[in-house]
């Protein structure tokens, strides 16, 4: 093998550094926190909607029973 052939292929540094890993970890934690907040907000909205529908159903059943 000739040393000139080896110089043609640049060495790729694909291993993330400590700072990059920390940034990735931090970004993943932020995504998880945002998703969790969205899930809690959606759960609250759905619970309120379910309660409204239940109350409407109860009123409808009362008016039909009278």
Image (cartoon, grey):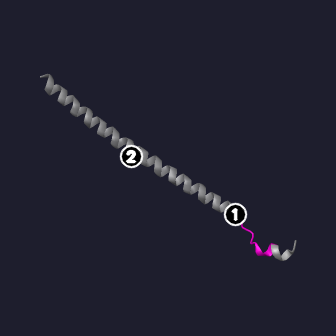
**Which residue was labeled with disc 2?**
41
Q: Which region of the structure is painted magenta?
A: 6-15
Labelled pair 2, 1 in contact (Cβ < 8 Å): no
Q: Quadrant of the N terminus?
A: bottom right
Tell me, yes or no, whether the highlighted magenta stretch contains residue 7.
Answer: yes
Describe the element under mark 1 as helix, strand or loop.
loop
Residue 1 image label: none
Image: 44 above or below 19 = above
Callout 2 crowding tier (Cα within 10 Å): few <14, some 14–19, many ≥20: few
In the image, farthest residue toward the right? 1
Describe the element under mark 2 as helix, strand or loop.
helix
Tell me which numbered mark, 2 or 1, is placed earlier along the sequence. Answer: 1
Alpha-carbon span between mark 2 and mark 1: 39 Å
Number of numbered labels in the structure image: 2
**Which residue was labeled with disc 1?**
14
In terms of secondary structure, what is the magenta stretch mainly?
loop
Identify the residue at image location x=36%, y=42%: 44
x then y, percent, for residue 66: 11, 22
In-image side of 56 versus 30 (left or right): left
Identify the residue at image location x=14%, y=25%: 64
The quadrant holding residue 58 is top left
x then y, percent, for residue 38: 42, 48
Callout 1 crowding tier (Cα within 10 Å): few <14, some 14–19, many ≥20: few
Tell me, yes or no, whether the highlighted magenta stretch contains residue 36.
Answer: no
Identify the residue at image location x=47%, y=49%: 35
């Amino acid at each position: 093998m000739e040393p000139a052939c080896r110089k043609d292929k640049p060495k790729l540094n694909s291993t993330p550094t400590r700072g990059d890993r920390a940034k990735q970890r931090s970004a993943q934690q932020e995504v998880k926190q945002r998703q969790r907040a969205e899930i809690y907000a959606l759960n609250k909205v759905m619970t309120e909607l379910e309660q409204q529908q239940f109350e409407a159903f109860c009123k409808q059943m009362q008016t039909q029973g009278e």
